[in-house]
Image (cartoon, helix red, strand yellow):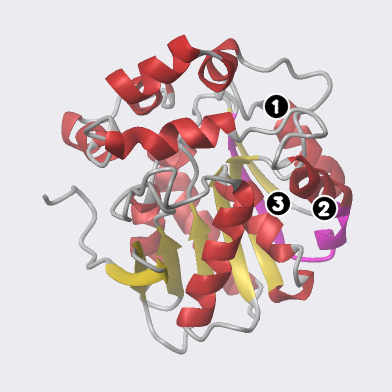
Amino acid sequence: MSYPDYPFTPQRFQVRPGIAMSYLDEGPRDGEIVLMLHGNPSWSYYWRKLVSGLSDRYRCIVPDHVGMGLSDKPGDADYDYTLASRIDDLATLLAHLGIDGKLTLAVHDWGGMIGFGWALRDPSRIARLVVLNTAAFPLPAEKPMPWQLKLGRDSRLGALAIRGFNAFSSAASRVGVCNAMPPDVRAAYVAPYNSWANRIATLRFVQDIPLAPGDKAWALVEESGRRLHEYADRPALLAWGLRDFVFDAHFLRGFEQKLPQAQSLIFDDAGHYVLEDKAAQIVPQVRRFLDAHPL
């Protein structure tokens, strides 16, 4: 299947025995590295316009997390769908590519916790940050857990809707934008999740959301939030759609407080998939930001 505005040839490698990860590696081998991490329920397709806008000069590494996009979608018996597993997979990919130096971390949605969780191992490797509608800390106390996520996380009915009817991916491709996606773009977002088996990760991501000590991902998320201020001396760009009902202004304020020197692009007419609504503004601004802060 071909995907609009995705003129790339994904590569694959065995991230774990019997499990292949798909990823993009676009741009010059000696270019400064921009690592782009998607969340749930998207995939590397989300980053396509930024890759196209940077890859003449920058080396863009964009994985599809296991169970997502074009990567393998193993069952629970073969893969532990947790934040810790995601972080280990990312480390394995970078080792596979021989990438062991400084890089720019670009994150969206659950990609924020994967990226910042990985960075806890060696924060010095993060040279620049591009942060789009995401989190790197627990749910703010003043932010209620959205009922849609709570339903998917904690109920059989929600789980059935996500795995049986692709409710999470299908809904996100509609409510995640202010400007409706063209039908072929929306089809590309949901295409990887075309069966009960292939929707396992879209559910497991939701079920892994940590809300309290004792949840599997809590310790990593709590530590990430506690140490987020350590990146305050790095160049950072925040690009945010305020019409995101999950990663809303509460999360934006969390980043602004910990990264007070960050540049900000704030859109009151953009949603969760802020790159879909505002690629024309964000992509050139990210390019200018990177050019202005060379490694």
In the rendered image of this protein, does residue 13 appear above or below residue 203? Answer: below
Tell me where residue 212 appears, x and y as whole percent: 79, 29
Q: What residue is shown at x 38% (from left), y 84% (from top)?
A: 28
In this view of the protein, which residue sits in the foreground, 231 or 265? 231
Q: Residues within 10 Å of mark 1 (few under 14, many from 20)?
A: some
Query: Is residue 236 found inside the magenta-colored segment of the image?
Result: yes
Cα gap from disc 3 to disc 2, whole angstroms: 16 Å
Q: Answer whether labels 1 and 3 touch (C-beta < 8 Å).
A: no
Q: Residues within 10 Å of mark 3 (few under 14, many from 20)?
A: some
- Tag 1: amino acid: Ala
Q: Secondary structure at mark 2?
A: helix
Q: Secondary structure at mark 1?
A: helix
The quarter of the image holding the C terminus is bottom right
Tell which tag, 1 or 3, sits nearer the viewer.
1
Q: Answer whether labels 3 and 2 touch (C-beta < 8 Å).
A: no
Q: Which residue is mark 3?
A: 263
Residue 237 shown left or right of residue 54 in the figure:
right
Q: Which residue is mark 2?
A: 228
Tell me where residue 114 appears, x and y as whole percent: 61, 53
Tell me the magenta residue range.
227-241
Tell me where residue 166 appears, x and y as whole percent: 31, 24
- Tag 3: amino acid: Gln
Q: Which residue is mark 1?
A: 249
Q: Earlier in the sequence, mark 3 or mark 2?
A: 2
Q: Earlier in the sequence, mark 1 or mark 2?
A: 2
Q: What residue is shown at x 70% (from left), y 72% (from top)?
A: 127
In this view of the protein, which residue sits in the foreground, 61 or 12? 12
